[in-house]
Image: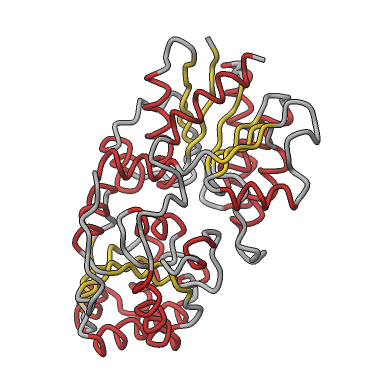
């Protein structure tokens, strides 16, 4: 019986851990899991509710860390190191590109425990993003790198990370766990005809877009202006980080100010609520990495409110268009409207929805050598 110490710390990791945990349960004769939450982003609305609705197993180890990133990283490393000493896992599993991911990879590497990185090989090539640093360093520390696409495998090879460069290194394109989760909970999405859009799902929470109050209000005004010009209804689940800036600008009237701009504010949405909205809306406007993919999985085009993306296949395939500035929204939307006329959302860019089983079977074989 092999033991995995699986690390989560933020909402997207819970979604990935759901599919991974279900596959472990199906193979419980060969592998077991200890689930550790770093406490990086924890509240009932942002983590607890996701854990419940995604049918995740109980958290075995819950860390309590401070909000300050400069201190939090060390606290998470210490907590993971202590868990490694107590559990003595055969491998530590990390997801994605958060501070939790890198902290756990560093702790495992120093303890000489193999690191399994799920969602390896992604690059935005934007070093202003802390996530980019986390991805690069975690990939360098990892022993097993499960990539969501062939292009991610190619990127790792370009960086010198490929089978054969050191003993036991394993690199494999296995597909995307979030597709597994979307199919498990959302089923097959409803097809939409790409005519004149009527409803948009908006998310806005990236620090570069919302931490500076002036930048945040420019995005809100630009979105309102574009939605008004296109007669669009905008559904906007407001992230706590974004709400902080809106309250600083408008005080207790922030919701009313959004409504006056034809933007419909909502509480932070559960994963199942997001899937429900994705089935209803015509488009997604987002600065989230995960929601870009969820839009694709649910066959909805995405306007990416950033100047770069780690999911380059979506832009290259015409499923998404980048929009770096609020002033570019109408132009970017025209480009998106044009690009989606000739796309096929059924193309298996990120696998077939059975990535978790593929990973677990591959990992069991690797650990048995």
Where residue 34 appears, as percent x and y from the top left, is 48, 22
Where residue 301 appears, as percent x and y from the top left, is 35, 67
Using residue 107 as the reference point, say whether residue 270 is left or right of it. left
Where residue 342 appears, as percent x and y from the top left, is 37, 71
The residue located at (62%, 44%) in the rendering is 73
Judge whether 61 appears above or below 275 on screen: above
Query: In the figure, residue 241 lies in which quadrant?
Result: bottom left
Using residue 344 as the reference point, say whether residue 305 is left or right of it. right
Using residue 221 as the reference point, say whether residue 77 is left or right of it. right
- Number of numbered discs visible in the structure rendering: 0
Of residues 35 and 189, the one drawn nearer to the viewer in this rendering: 189
Of residues 85 and 132, the one drawn nearer to the viewer in this rendering: 132
Can residue 76 be seen?
Answer: no
Judge whether 131 appears above or below 172 on screen: below
Using residue 106 as the reference point, say whether residue 303 is left or right of it. left
Where residue 257 appears, as percent x and y from the top left, is 24, 80
Can residue 358 be seen?
Answer: yes
Query: In the figure, residue 341 lies in which quadrant?
Result: bottom left
The residue located at (56%, 42%) in the rendering is 100
Q: The C terminus lies in which quarter of the figure?
A: top right
Query: In the figure, residue 238 lies in which quadrant?
Result: bottom left
Of residues 206 and 168, the one drawn nearer to the viewer in this rendering: 168
């Amino acid at each position: 019986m092999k033991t995995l110490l699986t690390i989560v710390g933020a909402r997207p990791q819970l979604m990935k851990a759901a599919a991974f945990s279900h596959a472990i349960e199906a193979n419980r004769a060969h592998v077991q899991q200890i689930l550790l939450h770093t406490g990086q982003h924890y509240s009932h609305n942002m983590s607890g509710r996701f854990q419940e609705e995604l049918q995740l197993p109980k958290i075995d180890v819950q860390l309590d860390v401070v909000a300050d990133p400069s201190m939090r990283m060390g606290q998470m490393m210490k907590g993971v190191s202590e868990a490694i000493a107590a559990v003595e896992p055969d491998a530590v599993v990390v997801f994605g590109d958060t501070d939790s991911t890198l902290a756990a990879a560093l702790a495992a590497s120093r303890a000489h425990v193999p690191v399994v990185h799920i969602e390896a090989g992604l690059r935005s090539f934007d070093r202003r993003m802390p996530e980019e640093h986390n991805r690069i360093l975690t990939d360098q520390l990892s022993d097993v790198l499960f990539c969501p696409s062939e292009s991610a495998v190619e990127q790792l090879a370009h960086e010198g990370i490929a089978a054969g460069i050191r003993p036991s290194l394993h690199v494999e394109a296995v597909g995307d766990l979030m597709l597994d989760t979307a199919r498990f909970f959302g089923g097959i999405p409803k097809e939409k005809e790409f005519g004149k859009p009527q409803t948009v799902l908006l998310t806005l929470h990236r620090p570069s877009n919302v931490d500076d109050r002036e930048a945040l209000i420019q995005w809100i005004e630009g979105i309102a202006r574009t939605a008004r010009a296109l007669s669009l209804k905008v559904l906007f689940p407001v992230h706590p980080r974004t709400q902080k800036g809106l309250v600083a600008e408008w005080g207790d009237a922030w919701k009313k100010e959004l409504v006056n701009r034809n933007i419909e504010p909502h509480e932070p949405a559960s994963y199942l609520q997001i899937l429900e909205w994705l089935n209803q809306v015509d488009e997604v406007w987002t600065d989230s990495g995960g929601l870009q993919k969820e839009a694709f999985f649910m066959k909805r085009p995405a306007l990416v409110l950033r100047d770069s993306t780690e999911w380059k296949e979506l832009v290259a395939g015409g499923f998404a268009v980048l929009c770096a500035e609020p002033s570019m929204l109408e132009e970017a939307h025209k480009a998106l409207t044009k690009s989606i006329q000739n796309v096929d959302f059924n193309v298996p860019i990120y696998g077939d929805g059975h990535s978790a089983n593929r990973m677990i079977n591959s990992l069991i074989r690797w650990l048995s050598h």
